[in-house]
């Protein structure tokens, strides 16, 4: 990864990710519902993308030369909107309207929000949409990267594997996908619901370039992404091992915070903990 | 049913011909299929423009969401397969990735309805109009013959936004001369009449015309309407039928639940209530048989329409 003059350092990325996590706690608490666990587990990946990796322009969200990001795990909207606010797509003050009547910040990622390319929420569709965009760009000679962030529970969906086959067969090497492998889905631990392991072998068998990383290590995220840019002839799947609820002790690895907002007391405790992290 | 000397024409062939013609003029037109391209007739487009044709294999959900991605990146997209798969395997993909964001994808489904014939119940789709007309932002078009199918394909390419078009496998008799332009959302009155209105869609429009001749012989003057768009519905023509004739029969190769008949009932009940008799599949699945045998067995014939007219006129008295 070449650090262009505007690219923040790893310590700066950590600071942004911490602010994103604090925002996730505040806004899900204010909304009284939402999905904090998967927002926290994917906060570092989304921070790395928007502050170091993607070509994009918050002042011109439809800039022709931009890379395309699709949050296929649309329930991580609190994290996504927080990153977009940090990047300058939406005012930070708007974040507190999450999930409330009249807001642009719908409970799942929604194109009414500047910067959001695709409305998502029903799992399994993001990779297919990425395939369509990649095909269109190939026809038009556009060089944009198409980045998809998926959940590990999303690997339960049949459509994911339809798209996996299709992308590899069509050699859609402009696609970089991430799986936020936090090991927890709505009803509990993925190993107890529908065990998708060994995911690496599955994606390799489907013809993808597969890289496993620690999804909380910015160096690894950046390096894996750079590798995907050099990979020709096949799409890349970056399987990011993450911790659900990362950054807040009582939310970490706790399935109950997949789709439940922290109470006021829990939020206060969580914010205190996050303030203590570097 | 169609008289023996009528020339039957393929709707599928005309769909494929329109795509091929448009493909030569519009570089942004792309076509997808899921392993049924010979039957849906998208294969000709694929041969002529292999770089803009994507056979997705037997993966309808992926096809539909991939179509959405292509449209999001600026393409005009037609995606085809049989109606039962095009809407049944893909409802949530259509809902979330096409209807909700109002993506410029046209789902053109062949093999709709009972006239699929020998393939039987699993392949005979009677619920597709209902599924699609229930989606906000969705346009639903049902051309009545080959020439209308050709015209409707052009009309769909010209409009922005999501649309569903359905047509059958079987060749059908012509009801239009191809001179009248196809306008999405506009019904055409094919025969004026004062006693009763027959509002039909798809291949039952031809049966409605035959029925009107049979009725005329017995002194009943039937108005015949080709309702080739189910959504947005031409409510003006429906209320005009209600006011002028006071009774309506609807006819469709679709379940009587959620189809044209229900759409007409909703329009009349809110605007000018009159008795409506719905002719269609009576909340049932189909079975194997030749198309024409099946249409007779399930009453989707001119005789069936005449019988419905008698019943609705009885209710009115």
Image (cartoon, rainbow, N blue to C red):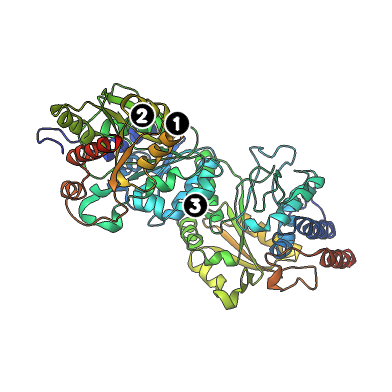
**Of A8 and A184, which appears nearest the observer?**
A184
Q: Quadrant of the C terminus of chain B?
A: top left
Q: State left or right for residue A161 relative to residue A86.
A: left
The chain letter under disc 3 is B
Q: Marks 2 and 3: CB-CB under 8 Å?
A: no
Neighbour tally class for label 2: few under 14, some 14-19, many 20 plus, Cα within 10 Å:
many
Q: Which residue is denoted by mark 1 in the rendering?
A: B271
The residues bearing labels 2 and 1 have C-alpha atoms spaced at a distance of 9 Å
> Can you say whether A79 is above or below A188 in the image?
above
The chain letter under disc 2 is B
Q: Earlier in the sequence, mark 3 or mark 1?
A: 3
Q: Marks 3 and 1: CB-CB under 8 Å?
A: no
Residue B235 visible to an observer of this rendering: yes
Label drawn at residue B242: 2
Looking at this rendering, what residue extends furthest in the left direction? B4
Q: Which residue is denoted by mark 3 in the rendering?
A: B93
Q: Marks 2 and 1: CB-CB under 8 Å?
A: yes
Is label 1 in a helix, a strand or a loop?
helix
Q: Earlier in the sequence, mark 2 or mark 1?
A: 2
């Amino acid at each position: 990864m070449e650090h262009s003059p505007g690219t923040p350092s790893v310590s700066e990325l950590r600071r942004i990710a911490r602010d994103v996590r604090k925002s996730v706690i505040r806004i899900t608490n204010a909304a009284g519902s939402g999905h904090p666990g998967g927002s926290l587990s994917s906060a570092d990946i989304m921070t790395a993308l928007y502050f170091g990796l993607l070509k994009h322009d918050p002042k011109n969200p439809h800039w022709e030369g931009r890379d395309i990001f699709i949050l296929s795990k649309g329930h991580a909207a609190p994290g996504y909107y927080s990153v977009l606010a940090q990047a300058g797509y939406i005012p930070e003050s708007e974040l507190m309207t999450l999930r409330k009547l009249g807001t642009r910040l719908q409970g799942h990622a929604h194109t009414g929000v500047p910067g959001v390319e695709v409305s998502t929420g029903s799992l399994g569709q993001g990779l297919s949409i990425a395939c369509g965009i990649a095909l269109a760009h190939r026809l038009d000679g556009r060089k944009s990267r198409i980045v998809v962030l998926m959940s590990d529970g999303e690997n339960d969906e049949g459509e994911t594997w339809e798209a996996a086959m299709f992308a590899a067969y069509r050699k859609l090497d402009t696609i970089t996908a991430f799986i936020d492998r936090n090991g927890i889905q709505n009803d509990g631990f993925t190993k107890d619901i529908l065990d998708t392991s060994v995911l690496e072998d599955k994606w390799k068998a489907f013809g993808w370039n597969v890289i496993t990383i620690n999804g909380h290590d910015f160096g690894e995220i950046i390096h894996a992404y750079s590798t995907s840019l050099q990979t020709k002839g096949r799409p890349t799947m970056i399987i990011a091992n993450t911790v659900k609820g990362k950054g807040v002790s009582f939310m970490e690895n706790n399935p109950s915070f997949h789709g439940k907002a922290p109470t006021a007391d829990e939020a206060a405790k969580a914010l205190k903990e996050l303030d203590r992290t570097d | 049913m169609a008289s023996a000397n009528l020339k039957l024409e393929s709707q599928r062939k005309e769909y494929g011909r329109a795509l091929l013609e448009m493909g030569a003029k519009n570089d942004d037109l792309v076509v997808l299929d899921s392993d049924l391209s010979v039957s849906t007739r998208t294969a000709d487009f694929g041969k002529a423009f292999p770089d803009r044709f994507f056979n997705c294999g037997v993966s309808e959900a992926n096809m539909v969401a991939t179509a959405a991605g292509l449209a999001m990146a600026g393409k005009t997209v037609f995606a085809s397969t049989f109606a039962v798969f095009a809407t049944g395997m893909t409802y949530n993909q259509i809902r979330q990735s096409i209807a909700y964001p109002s993506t410029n994808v046209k789902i053109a489904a062949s093999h709709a309805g009972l006239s699929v014939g020998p393939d039987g119940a699993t392949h005979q789709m009677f619920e597709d109009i209902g599924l699609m007309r229930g989606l906000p932002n969705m346009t639903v078009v049902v051309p009545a013959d080959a020439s209308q199918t050709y015209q409707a394909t052009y009309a769909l390419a010209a409009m922005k936004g999501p649309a569903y078009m359905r047509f059958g496998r079987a060749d059908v008799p012509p009801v239009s001369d191809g001179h009248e332009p196809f306008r999405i959302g506009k019904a055409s009155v094919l025969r004026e009449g004062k006693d009763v209105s027959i509002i039909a869609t798809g291949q039952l429009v031809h049966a409605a015309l035959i029925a009107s001749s049979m009725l005329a012989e017995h002194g009943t003057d039937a108005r015949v309407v080709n309702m080739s768009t189910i959504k947005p519905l031409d409510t003006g023509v429906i209320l005009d039928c209600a006011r002028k004739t006071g009774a309506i029969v609807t006819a469709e190769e679709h379940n009587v639940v959620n189809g044209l008949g229900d759409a007409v009932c909703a329009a009349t009940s809110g605007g000018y209530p009159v008795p409506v008799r719905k002719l269609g599949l009576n909340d049932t699945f189909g079975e194997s048989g030749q198309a024409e045998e099946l249409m007779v067995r399930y009453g989707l014939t001119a005789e069936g329409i005449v019988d419905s007219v008698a019943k609705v006129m009885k209710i009115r008295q």
